[in-house]
Amino acid sequence: MNGEKHNGQQQPEDPWASVTVTADPPAPYDQPAHQRQLTAAGYGQEQRTRYIEESGQDPEYAACVWDEQIVAAAEAAGIIPESPGALSPAEEAMHAARDAAISEFWTQHPEYDVFSNSSENQALFRQAMEHGDQKAREALGDEVAELVVRGSQTPAEEPAHEVDEEIDL
C-alpha cells in the first residue's frame, strides 16, 4: 500500500508504516544443536564468513578475531551457549595427565634438540610419549585409560557375540 498507485495517482509513503526486516534464514535441521543455536543467535558459519569478508582485515586475522574474541566474548556474556567439548571429561583428564608427564620428561632431558632428526632424538621422543602414557595410566587408573583408548565404549555397547568361524580367502 505504501507508494502504490491508487486510481492512477501515486500515494505518498507512510513514514509510520511497519517495516519488514528480513532475518537470516533459520539453521537447517541437519546441523548439530550447538550450530543451530549459534546461527539463531547470529554467530553461525554464514555470519562468520560475512564478518571475515566485510571486515577489511586480512582473512586469517579476521577469522582469528571472530573465533577468539567475538565468539568468546558472546559466550562469556551468555549471549550464546559455550561450545560443547569435543572430548569427554575422561579424555580431557587423560590428555592433561599425559601432557603434564611429557612436559616433566622434557625438563629432565634438556639434551633433546627439536630441530634434529637424529636416531637419538627419535628414541627420546618415543620415550617421552611412552612416559606420558604410563604416567597418565598411573594417575587415572587403567580402567579409565582403557575407556579412553577404546573410545569410551562401555561393555553394554560391545557386540553381543563374536564370530567364531574363520574366513577362508
Image (cartoon, helix red, strand yellow):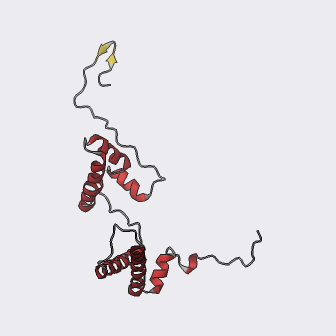
Residue furthest right in the image: 168
Which residue appears at 63% of the width and 76% of the height?
Answer: 159
Q: Residue extending furthest top?
A: 8
Q: Nearer the viewer, residue 10 or 62?
A: 62
Quadrant hosting residue 36: bottom left
Q: Going 40% across and 87% down the picture, which residue do you hit? A: 138
Q: How many marks?
A: 0
Q: Nearer the viewer, residue 92 or 167?
A: 167
Left or right of residue 169, residue 62 in this image = left
- Image coordinates of residue 117 in percent, x first then y, are 40, 68
**The C terminus lies in quadrant:** bottom right
Q: Position of residue 14 (x, y in %)?
A: 24, 26
Residue 3, given in percent of the width and then of the height, sits at 29, 22
How far across and down, in percent of the image, does residue 167 sit?
A: 75, 72
Q: Is residue 21 above or below residue 154?
A: above
Q: Quadrant of the N terminus?
A: top left
The residue under the point 45% across, 54% down is 31
Nearest the eye: 26 or 49? 49
Instruction: Out of 99 and 7, give the one closest to the viewer.
Output: 99
